[in-house]
Image (cartoon, helix red, strand yellow):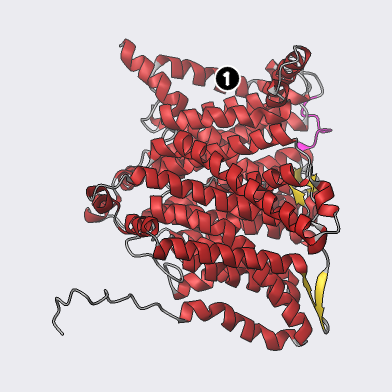
């Protein structure tokens, strides 16, 4: 076979397996200490659901960073905006939530999720044009400008929705738990896990199987080359930024429903978590942030059960350990 | 002007503004009567030191850190916890200060060595995460820190409000311990500010600026980047620790809201950028403007909001609500980042340059 065999597919980059297995390893190590199987199952299921919600928020951040080299400190504002947007649907349609019909419950959840994603995405467009666009390529100014944008956005949210927390109720179908023997798994956690998996699958499909995904990945690797080939990278940028914001909004809406309240302070809180996740996962890597979200959530849950005092700093410890092992995260993106 | 390390403020308008601010702060207890103006003046002094030490990092070294308030908190809690545990004595105060300084140095060194090797953006994220964890930790270790309630403590006798230095009033003002502690704060801030000015105008400061402008070239010239950046982090952490210690000494209270909250970090960022990055004098102007606005702008906004509500304008009352004052400062912040990267100091300098 000659080296110029045109029909042959390009050699695929080998994916490293070990980083992907870290959540499993953590679960295996933690299992004997936890002892009871039912507790272990409950904790693991809860961790997976939490991980999926975190992933939904963090993947938007890592996508924007990978594609545009913009670290968006305003990402938290989109998370909070998503939570408020969900309340715009859930409060007027409260009787759908409390109805005894599965379909009405599901419809109101989907509507709320859609509203969160669409409103956050639209606001992402404005944010990109006004705040981010003037400072592309200047890291220091980017950080400052997006923080300023975040301050303004958070204050605007308080001005529009009031400073108090907005209570949200879960649609009736998703309240309560499935019980297997002694282990109880909340229904909403199952739903959150499914949504998170769907988001991950969707992102992977778009990135790996479509032309737009190809361009985005190429733009991550080498922006100038893609521009030289005649593609409008700046339009692609806006689209990616809107997608990232929409994901943040979706994650925020799911988290707000899980907590039963929407409030502006959610933004800052989860922004920190998102940063930890994307650092662990490797800046710019969607797959890495998927693994890292599960890892962080599992560790937080196990630590919360075993050594509650440690749980507060478990994220930081996980980050330090991972970075000592792999200084650029679980799945480093080349060129960063 | 060796006391200013050969770096006096340039521009007539800037000089006049600075002299006014410093005179107002120096004479605050005698010029303005009542508790609120003195509190505003003391907070301004503390913020000047906090912002100036942050500017060493952000403006001179070009490093964005979100852990600056953590060091502020370490200083505040160090002094607060020691005075609370050991009782009001100068020894406890000194011990708290030393412990806090050592802890700050250790933290700054660890963070710096760990994360300054890579991009500055990485440092920003790591400091944010560490500061957040520290914040949670401080409010959880309630046996030590008093948790969310914080700790109220007694200060050494000379600084207590009931103390009188002389029996008679001086210029119509009784010289209480409160005024003495104000002047303690003022004096320490002045000295620390001059020290920082010395640092940024030293060869070390020049290297920092060189690294900010072009790290690759600075390294090629033989300067060790990680060393210089880490040292800058440590110095600025010490400044913040001192500011924190002064603040808790002034308030005679330390708690998460006054010493560790993330909103203080945002405030510091706003002050640095609006005042002027890369010039320590910007810290004086930024801090004075910010604290003044924080204390008095809200009253103005309450009036405007009421007027808008009376005129039945939509949305405006909510936007002008006194609690939304940060919205307007955020707007000023973003505009400053885009149009006046060197802040008020830069604008005043440019004006002066045009005229001459």
Instruction: Check the picture and name the quadrant holding the N terminus of chain A.
Output: bottom left
Q: Is residue B163 magenta?
A: yes
The one of A140 and A229 positioned closer to us in this rendering: A229
Which residue is depicted at the point 46% across and 56% down? A63
Image coordinates of residue B339 in percent, x first then y, are 42, 27
The one of A297 and B33 positioned closer to us in this rendering: A297
State whether residue B129 appears in this view: no
Q: Is residue A91 above or below residue A44?
A: above
Instruction: Check the picture and name the quadrant holding the C terminus of chain A.
Output: bottom left
Residue B167, located in which quarter of the rendered image? Answer: top right
Q: Which residue is mark 1?
A: B23
Tell me the element at label 1.
Answer: helix
Q: Is residue B258 magenta?
A: no
The range drawn in magenta is: B159-166
Image coordinates of residue A32 in percent, x first then y, are 70, 89
Q: Is residue B122 left or right of residue B174?
A: left
Q: Residues within 10 Å of mark 1 (few under 14, many from 20)?
A: few
Q: Is residue B250 left or right of residue B354?
A: right
State whether residue B138 appears in this view: yes
Could you tell me which chain the residue with mark 1 belongs to?
B
Image coordinates of residue A121 in percent, x first then y, are 55, 44
Q: Is residue A41 above or below residue B165?
A: below
Q: Is residue A155 above or below residue A58?
A: above
Q: Is residue A251 above or below residue B190?
A: below
Residue A334, located in which quarter of the rendered image? Answer: bottom left
Q: Is residue A117 left or right of residue B2?
A: right
């Amino acid at each position: 076979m000659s080296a110029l065999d045109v029909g042959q597919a390009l050699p695929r980059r080998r994916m490293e397996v070990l980083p992907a297995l870290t959540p499993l390893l953590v679960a295996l190590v933690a299992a004997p200490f936890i002892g009871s199987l039912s507790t272990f199952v409950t904790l693991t299921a809860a961790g997976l659901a939490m991980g999926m919600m975190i992933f939904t928020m963090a993947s938007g951040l890592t996508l924007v960073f990978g594609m545009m080299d913009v670290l968006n400190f305003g990402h938290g504002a989109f998370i909070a905006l998503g939570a408020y947007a969900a309340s715009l649907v859930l409060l007027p349609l409260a009787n759908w939530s409390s109805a005894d019909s599965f379909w009405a419950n599901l419809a109101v959840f989907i509507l709320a999720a859609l509203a969160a994603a669409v409103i956050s995405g639209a606001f992402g467009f404005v944010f990109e044009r006004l705040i981010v666009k003037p400072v592309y390529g200047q890291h220091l100014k980017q950080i400052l400008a997006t923080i300023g944008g975040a301050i303004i956005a958070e204050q605007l949210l308080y001005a529009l929705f009031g400073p108090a927390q907005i209570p949200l109720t879960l649609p009736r179908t998703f309240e309560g738990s499935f019980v297997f023997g002694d282990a109880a798994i909340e229904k909403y956690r199952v739903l959150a896990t499914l949504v998170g998996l769907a988001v991950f699958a969707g992102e992977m499909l778009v990135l790996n199987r479509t032309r737009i995904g190809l361009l985005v990945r190429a733009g991550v690797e080498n922006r100038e080359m893609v521009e030289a080939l005649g593609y409008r990278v700046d339009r692609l940028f806006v689209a990616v930024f809107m997608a990232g914001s929409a994901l943040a909004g979706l994650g925020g809406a799911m988290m707000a429903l899980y907590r039963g309240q929407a409030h502006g302070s959610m933004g800052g809180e989860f922004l920190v978590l998102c940063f930890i996740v994307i650092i662990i996962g490797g800046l710019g890597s969607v797959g890495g942030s998927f693994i890292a979200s599960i890892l962080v959530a599992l560790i937080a849950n196990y630590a919360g059960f075993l050594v509650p005092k440690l749980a507060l700093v478990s994220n930081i410890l996980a980050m330090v350990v991972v970075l000592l092992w792999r200084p650029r995260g679980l799945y480093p993106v080349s060129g960063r | 002007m060796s006391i200013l390390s050969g770096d006096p403020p340039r521009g007539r308008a800037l000089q006049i503004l600075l002299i006014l601010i410093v005179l107002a702060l120096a004479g605050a207890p005698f010029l303005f009567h009542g508790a609120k103006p003195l509190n505003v003046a003391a907070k301004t002094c503390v913020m000047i030191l906090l912002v100036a030490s942050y500017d060493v990092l952000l403006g001179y070294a070009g490093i964005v850190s979100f852990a600056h308030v953590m060091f502020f908190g370490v200083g505040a809690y160090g002094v607060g916890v020691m005075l609370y545990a050991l009782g009001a004595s100068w020894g406890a105060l000194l011990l708290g200060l030393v412990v806090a300084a050592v802890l700050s140095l250790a933290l700054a060194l660890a963070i710096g060595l760990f994360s300054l090797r890579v991009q500055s953006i990485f440092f920003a994220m790591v400091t944010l995460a560490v500061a957040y964890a520290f914040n949670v930790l401080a409010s959880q270790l309630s046996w030590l820190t008093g948790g969310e309630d914080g700790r109220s403590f007694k200060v050494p006798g000379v600084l207590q409000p009931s103390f009188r230095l002389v029996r008679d009033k001086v210029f119509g003002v009784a010289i209480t311990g409160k005024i003495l502690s104000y002047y303690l704060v003022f004096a320490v801030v002045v000295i620390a500010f001059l020290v920082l000015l010395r640092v940024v105008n030293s060869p070390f400061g020049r290297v920092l600026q060189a690294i900010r402008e072009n790290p690759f070239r600075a390294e090629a010239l033989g300067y060790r980047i990680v060393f210089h950046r880490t040292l800058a982090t440590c110095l600025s952490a010490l400044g913040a620790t001192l500011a924190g210690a002064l603040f808790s000494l002034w308030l005679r209270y330390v708690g998460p809201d006054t010493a560790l909250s993330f909103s203080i970090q945002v405030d510091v960022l706003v002050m640095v950028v609006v005042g002027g990055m890369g010039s320590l004098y910007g810290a004086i102007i930024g801090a004075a403007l910010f604290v003044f606005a924080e204390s008095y702008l809200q009253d103005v906004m309450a009036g405007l909001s009421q007027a808008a509500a009376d005129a039945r304008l939509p949305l405006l009352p909510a936007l002008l609500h006194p609690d939304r004052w940060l919205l307007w400062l955020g707007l000023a912040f973003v505009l400053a980042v885009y149009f006046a990267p060197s802040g008020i100091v830069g604008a005043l300098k440019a004006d002066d340059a045009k005229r001459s």
